[in-house]
């Protein structure tokens, strides 16, 4: 098991990582996900021992690592900037970590051939890195890290420079290869598709703070706060400012900017009870484009009027941006609706489709699809 216990890293007055605590299980593939500058690579460097934490402790299999030199941690790392030996061939780059551990020539050749086949770099084994493309160099760097056995593999954006088709194929190959290793894998990315498809669990961080640590299903369906909700998913989640209201004798959410022609969103009983006793300063509804739908005419289900703002045709589906009051909301629609800008449409938004956030923290999630998280005043970030 790999444990980070309240690990903090400061550079002068700047805090790059703030009291990060994680527990990563044996043979678990964990992805650290967040925007540029979030502290993703800093976390990897701390685990690897390249930099030392300002405070906190890193444990591996029950042993403290803070004072263990990087070369004695039995960890293998892929750097975002490749870090290949320019004077060595691709074969020699891949063979280097094996020979450094005293492995014989026949076994070295076998392991290099195996990893080169998986990464599709066999034709380049005799070339030097200077004669490779950026994507080819990245695959060599990935191969050099994965060719040897280690307790922990640390991967810093290992496939970000590949073209889209190869990156898609490499996701599956990378996950299968790491599963065969039966070691801990900590992978850094800013691509949510990569994070969702590869990970057993995801670490979402922003500005050095842990936002949420959970399975891809938990991160997507029950985000802990607005940041997680907005950062995971394509198209991004749309947000609607609302305020607490009473409508037809029940608790409701009044959409901001619709006071002249009020649009009220219903609230389920559990969330209504919470809002009745604790009214946050800000109340925002978040909706994913795939969770709501639109129709050309009103119905009992589609009862919220909206105006078509943008139509994006993608072949297998359309992304329609509609305007509700002053808010822009994206909706996935089947192709062929033949909608145009300024058309009036009707949208369904209710407790079965929306996430509710108070003061940026999750209060409730859509009912019916996943078991809703308990409604309570959220703690922490």
Image: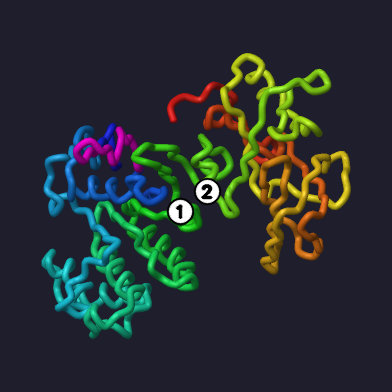
Q: Residue at x 13, y 51 (%)?
A: 72
Confirm or deny contact between disc 2 and disc 1 (CB under 8 A). yes
Q: Is residue 63 visible?
A: no
> Which residue bears the numbered disc 2?
232
Nearer to me, 61 or 7: 7
Nearer to me, 351 or 346: 346
Graded by Cα atoms within 10 Å as few (under 14), some (14 to 19) or many (20 or more), the crowding at tag 2 reads many
Q: In the image, residue 324 lies at what x, y percent?
A: 73, 42
Q: In the image, residue 274 lies at what x, y percent?
A: 63, 19
Q: Which residues are magenta?
A: 9-24
- Check residue 363 in the rendering and tell me which mark sits there, or answer none: none
Question: Would residue 219 be found to the left or right of residue 2 on screen?
Answer: right
Question: Would residue 203 be found to the left or right of residue 7 on screen?
Answer: right
Asked if residue 10 is among those painted magenta in the image, a careful observer would answer yes
Measured Cα–Cα span from mark 2 to mark 1: 9 Å
Q: Is residue 262 above or below residue 303?
A: above
Q: How many marks overall? A: 2
Q: State the colouring used for the structure image.
A: rainbow
- Check residue 195 in the rendering and tell me which mark sits there, or answer none: 1
In the orientation shown, which residue stands out farthest toward the top?
277
Graded by Cα atoms within 10 Å as few (under 14), some (14 to 19) or many (20 or more), the crowding at tag 1 reads many
Asked if residue 18 is among those painted magenta in the image, a careful observer would answer yes
Q: Is residue 244 above or below residue 83?
A: above
Quarter of the image holding residue 381? top left
Q: SS class of the residue under badge 2?
A: loop
Q: SS class of the residue under badge 1?
A: helix
Quarter of the image holding residue 281? top right
Quadrant that contains the N terminus: top left
Q: Main secondary structure of the magenta part?
A: strand
């Amino acid at each position: 098991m790999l444990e980070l216990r309240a690990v903090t890293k400061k550079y002068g007055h700047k805090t790059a990582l703030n009291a990060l605590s994680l527990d990563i299980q044996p043979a678990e593939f964990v992805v650290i996900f967040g925007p540029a500058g979030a502290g993703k690579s800093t976390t990897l460097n701390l685990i690897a021992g390249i930099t030392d934490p300002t405070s906190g402790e890193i444990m591996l299999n029950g042993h403290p690592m803070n004072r263990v030199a990087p070369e004695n941690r039995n960890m293998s790392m892929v750097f975002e900037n490749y870090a290949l030996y320019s004077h060595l061939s691709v074969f020699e780059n891949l063979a280097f970590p094996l020979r450094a551990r005293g492995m014989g020539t026949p076994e070295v050749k076998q392991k290099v051939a195996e990893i080169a086949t998986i990464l599709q770099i066999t034709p380049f084994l005799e070339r030097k890195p200077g004669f490779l493309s950026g994507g080819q160099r990245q695959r060599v760097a990935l191969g050099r890290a994965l060719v040897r056995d280690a307790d922990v593999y640390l991967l810093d954006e290992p496939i970000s420079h590949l073209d889209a088709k190869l990156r898609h194929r490499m996701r599956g190959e990378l996950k299968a290869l790491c599963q065969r290793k039966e070691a801990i894998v900590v992978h850094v990315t800013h691509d949510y598709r990569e994070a969702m498809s590869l990970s057993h669990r995801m670490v979402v961080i922003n500005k050095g703070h842990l936002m949420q640590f959970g399975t891809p299903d938990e991160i997507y369906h029950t985000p802990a706060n607005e940041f997680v909700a907005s950062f995971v998913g394509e198209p991004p989640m749309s947000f609607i400012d609302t305020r607490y209201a009473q409508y037809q004798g029940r608790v409701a959410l009044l959409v901001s900017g619709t006071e002249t022609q009020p649009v009220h969103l219903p609230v389920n009983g559990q969330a209504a009870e919470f809002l009745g006793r604790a009214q946050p300063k800000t109340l925002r509804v978040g909706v994913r484009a795939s969770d709501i739908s639109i129709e050309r005419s009103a119905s009992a289900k589609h009862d919220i009027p909206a105006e078509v703002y943008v139509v994006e045709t993608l072949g297998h589906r359309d992304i329609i941006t509609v305007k509700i009051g002053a808010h822009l909301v994206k909706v996935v629609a089947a192709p062929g609706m033949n909608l145009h800008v300024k058309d009036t449409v009707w949208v369904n938004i209710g407790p079965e489709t929306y996430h509710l956030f108070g003061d940026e923290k999750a209060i409730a999630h859509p009912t019916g699809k996943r078991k809703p998280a308990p409604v309570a005043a959220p703690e922490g970030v």
